[in-house]
Image (cartoon, coloured by chain):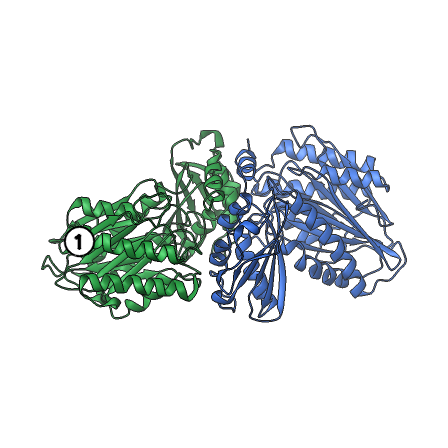
Chain colours: A blue, B green
Amino acid sequence: MSVTAAAGFRAAGVAAGVKSSGGADVALVVNDGPIDAAAGVFTANRAKANPVLWSQQALADGTARAVILNSGGANCFTGAFGFQTTHQTAERVAERLGIGAVEVQVCSTGLIGVGDEAFRQAVLRGVDLAVDALGDDEAAGLAAARAIMTTDSVPKQAIDSRGGYTVGGMAKGAGMLAPGLATMLVVLTTDAVADAAMLDRALRAATRVTFDRLDSDGCMSTNDTVLLLASGASGQRASEAELTAAVTAVCDDLARQLQADAEGASHDIAIEVLGAASEDDAVSVGRSVARSNLFKAAIFGNDPNWGRVLAAIGTTDASFDPFEVDVAFNGVRVCHAGEPDRPREEVDLTPRETRIRIDLHAGEHAATIRTNDLTHEYVHENSAYAS
Amino acid sequence: MSVTAAAGFRAAGVAAGVKSSGGADVALVVNDGPIDAAAGVFTANRAKANPVLWSQQALADGTARAVILNSGGANCFTGAFGFQTTHQTAERVAERLGIGAVEVQVCSTGLIGVGDEAFRQAVLRGVDLAVDALGDDEAAGLAAARAIMTTDSVPKQAIDSRGGYTVGGMAKGAGMLAPGLATMLVVLTTDAVADAAMLDRALRAATRVTFDRLDSDGCMSTNDTVLLLASGASGQRASEAELTAAVTAVCDDLARQLQADAEGASHDIAIEVLGAASEDDAVSVGRSVARSNLFKAAIFGNDPNWGRVLAAIGTTDASFDPFEVDVAFNGVRVCHAGEPDRPREEVDLTPRETRIRIDLHAGEHAATIRTNDLTHEYVHENSAYAS
């Protein structure tokens, strides 16, 4: 169950010929109300794809009635023609649903530079097929989740119910996962009653500690979009704290599914930073490790190379003394106060789940950054993506 | 010819048992004067190895008479015992040469955390062997250059003569190459007459546009050291401009040798950024591309993926409009004004030398950043390094 788990939503996923493979490639999510409050978080990359440029503007009024998504092409760096394609796509959805074009959010994912006439016609055909295929059941939600997959090996869905309402969601993403989001599209739906301002705060609070702390390969995408739509169909007015908790739970679940499906990864790594002087320091230290190719290659080789951890965190400006730091790999403290501690042979890095614990001994704050190892498969998949 | 090319210098390289392989692992460079002016640039990493901590202090007076270097262990994060090892090493050199310990620079390279009693005894044995082996000929310089190799496949030496004096140098490094230097040790010697302040300015000007613009894998080392020693033995007083040019030429030559020998690389990539509003902007844009794993994996796959270039530069805060940028791969402009231009099939990425030209159309400044591609071999070598 995903975007159709909450009452008031219909969805569809269809094959429209955007992908040359013939697979499902256009998804549609429709909010049937009674309310149409919505919030979104978009990529921080200045190189924004056409659908991001459109959707940010269209969401400025805090409402959305539908989300149209395609895989098979990012429609990024495709110029004025590409922006017109996004606009026409929103207009086609609006026309078919009897709503306004600015009530339609548009998301695209795939290769940058893809967005020609054939792409446009395929997406528009997808709109028609998807409207005809809309359903409110589990199968409809799953079809939508499948249609947004690119190099994903599995569809990603999550759900959380509390307080008489539900939050559900779907996500795609399997690489280019980085702070400020990733090459990821996420649509969350809820039947709680909430206004756009509360949705916005809840969504930002949730993404800050979930998607923003997933840094698979340090690369930031041009198309990242996370949307949260409320139908109010449950009639239950949500408290902000409870809604934030529910949205965070769904985002956390989806983020872990993204991590588990990262291209070519053989380890899912949680970098837990403790004893930091501030939460920002903890995040900065964790991210420096998550972005060290030498560290990531060592994990691939099942090597508890704590020297590469310390070399990475030494490049940050966080408040701590590098020579007072403890580092543990999967529970074995291999470095204590900046010197070798337990023998590296005691560390077992064969499980996929990997925990690196870094105690800075500089304060009371903590944060966990999630990443993956650097593998032969990562290189292979990312050198062959366009061909 | 390298560190012994300039008059007034002797060198040696010996096998002392620091490396378990039995290969050469201790090098010594001695300045016989008549002057002993020196300058150094050290890693910007806060996690500094013991020899870096020693050498920075010992060089504070602008003089050095000898440099002792070892491969086979970084003596980093080895605590007070490791610092004592560095100190004892300097003292042993000083005793054997009849100079003061603070006139001895110490450099180590190898695995972090390695620096136990056996390491200490091997390095001290190396001092004795090296003093006995000192010579002022080409063979002595080559022996020193070989003794500092770790994963390097070839020794690196360079020379430049002008104005009646010579600048020569040796370098090691084959990975962890990043701004603020790399896992690299470089010793430069000159027989020009120059004071420490001029040497310092010349060295910083040279490293800023050479080693600091080589970003092989984004990782910054704990042991990076670049030293410049002047003997004055030519009797020629150098002009600052000419000396800077000579030192820059030698650094540039060595930097290209480091790039060409980067672990597992199959492409040497020059990222030329033009039309920037400032030189800092050009460097920042070039570096963002050099650090994109997705871009680097694409080059490995001979894929002119300009979308990944634009996605990378969009993460910087340099002054330019992402939608006005041109990108060319090996002379073929595949992106013009933020849209597809020539077909990617026209680009030939099979040569090892790869040129990416990015025109920001935002000003008159330029800079070139050098990097390598991300390959299966990189992952393999860096996952197996410690084992």
Q: Which residue lies furthest to the left in this view?
A: B235
Disc 1 packing (10 Å; few <14; some 14–19; many ≥20): many
Instruction: Please state which of residues B61 and A251 is positioned toward the viewer in this rendering.
Output: B61
Instruction: Please state which of residues B170 and A350 is positioned toward the viewer in this rendering.
Output: A350
Left or right of B227: which side holds B283? Answer: right
Instruction: Please state which of residues B142 and B277 is positioned toward the viewer in this rendering.
Output: B142
Type of the residue with mark 1: Arg
Instruction: Please state which of residues A53 and A284 is positioned toward the viewer in this rendering.
Output: A284
Q: For mark 1, what is the residue?
A: B10
Where residue A100 sits: x, y (%)?
A: 77, 48
Residue at 15% x, 47% y is: B137
Question: Which chain is disc 1 placed on?
Answer: B
* Quarter residue B224 falls in: bottom left
Where residue B38 sits: x, y (%)?
A: 23, 63
Q: What is the count of numbered marks?
A: 1
Left or right of B365: which side holds A4? Answer: right
The N terminus of chain B sits in image quarter:
top left
Q: Mark yes or no: residue B208 visible.
A: no
Left or right of B384: which side holds B181? Answer: left
Q: Please, what secondary structure does the residue beneath circle 1 have?
A: strand
Q: Mark yes or no: residue B230 visible.
A: yes
* Quarter residue B332 falls in: top left
